Image (spheres, rainbow, N blue to C red):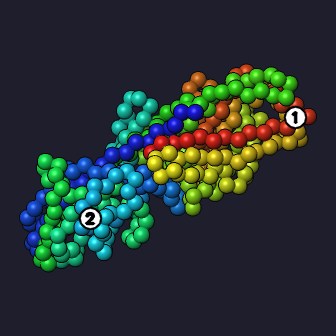
Amino acid sequence: MNNLKFNSRGYYSLAVLDADGNTKKEIKHTDNVITYEGAFSSLFVGSGTGQTPLTNSLYAAVGTGTVELTRSSTALGAESSGRSGGVGGGNRASTESDNLDGTSTISITRTFSFELGSKVGTFSEVGVYAGSSGSNIVAGQLIKDEFGSPTTVTLLSDEQLVVTYTLDWTFPNVSTNVGTGTVTDALSNSYDYEVWAQPYFTDYTIGSSNQGIRAFKFSNSVFSTGEVTFLGSDGVTSIYDSGDLGSGFTPSHDGSGTVTLTGQNLTFSPSDFSTTDLKFIGFYTNQSNSNNEDLVNTTDLLGKINGRNSVYVSFNPAIPKTASDSFNIQLEYTLTV
C-alpha cells in the first residue's frame, strides 16, 4: 500500500510593543516545525466533523529552552506559564490553492497578543498548542535572528508581546490510488483490486466554503460510526448498505508521522445479500453527514461531493456472491503527516 501524504509547514513572527502600541522590536518570518503529533491532532482528531486546521483553537506560548525543536518534540523546552489564545485567519474559500498534482494547500494565520506586562524576562523559544494548558505542541521553534541563529527577546513590564503564526497544510483534493492486490475466493477464482482514498474535504471543489471533512476525522481516537456500502459496476446501484458498524476505523500514530487506520474484520452472512456484480465497496466512517448518497464515478473512482465514504475498493472483474456465500473483508491503510 502507498501512504496517503498530508504535508505541513509553518513560520512565525514576533513583535514587542510599548504601552502605546508602537513596535520596539520585530522578528519576521522565521521557519518553525510542525510536530508529528501536532499535524496528526490538527488534521484528524477533534470533537466534530467540521473541525479542521482552519477552525481549530490555538494558543501561543513562550519559553526559555535552548534546544532546537524537531518534528518529534512534544513541548517547548522550558515553557513560561500562561498562554495566549489566537484570533484570525481561516477561510478555505480564500486560502486554498490547487497544486495541480492532486493536492491543495490552505494557510491559516493566527495572531496572539499577550497582555501588556504579562510576559517579563528573556525568552528564547516560541510555539503554539491546541489547548490553553497541557496538550502536545502543534508547532514551534527557537527564536532566531535574520541569519537563522538562536537569539532571545527581552520583555519589560511595560511591554507587550505579539506572536503571529502561519501554518500551511497540504492534503489530497482528488481520489488517490493507494493500493493494489489480488484476492481469491473459495473456488480459486482471482479478482484484482485497487484501493482509492478520497479527498480530504467532503466538498472537494477548490476554494469551497464547505470545511466538512470526508471521514478522516476522529473523535476520542476512534470514529463514532462506521458503515460499508456495496455498489454495482455502474457505481450507482446499491447492492447492500451495512448500517452502523460501531467504531469503524481505529487510528494509531507511531509518533514518527505514520498513522495506521485499522478497520474492523467484517463478515457478511449468506442472507445479507447476493449479487453477480459486486464492483465497488465504500467505507464510511465519518461521524455525521447530511448527504448519505453512496455514488462513485467509475472513471476516476471519485465519490459524490458531500458523500460519506473515505475509501473505495474496486474489483476487476466484479465479484459474485450467491445466497450460499459469506463475505469477509477488513481494510487497513496508512497516512503520512
For residue 225, which quarter of the picture? bottom right
Q: Amino acid at mark 2?
A: Gly
> Would residue 55 be found to the left or right of residue 190 on screen?
left
* Residue wearing tag 2: 65
> Would residue 193 be found to the left or right of residue 102 on screen?
right
Label 2 Cα crowd, 10 Å radius (few <14 / some 14-19 / many 20+):
some
Q: Amino acid at mark 1?
A: Asp
Decide if residue 230 is in sight here: yes
Residue 285 on image: x %, y %? 63, 49
Residue 299 on image: x %, y %? 59, 23
Task: State how many labels appear.
Answer: 2
For residue 309, which quarter of the picture? top right
Decide if residue 50 is in sight here: no
Query: Please, which residue is most extreme toward the right here?
Result: 324
- The residue tagged with tag 1: helix, strand or loop? loop
Q: Closer to the camera, 24 or 302?
A: 24
What residue is rendered at 85% in x and 38% in y? 326
* Residue wearing tag 1: 325
Q: Is residue 73 above or below residue 121?
A: above
Quadrant into which the C terminus falls: top left
What residue is rendered at 46% in x and 47% in y? 257
Mark sitting earlier along the chain (2/1):
2
**Callout in the foreground (2, 1):** 2
Marks 2/1: CA–CA distance: 63 Å
Label 1 Cα crowd, 10 Å radius (few <14 / some 14-19 / many 20+):
some
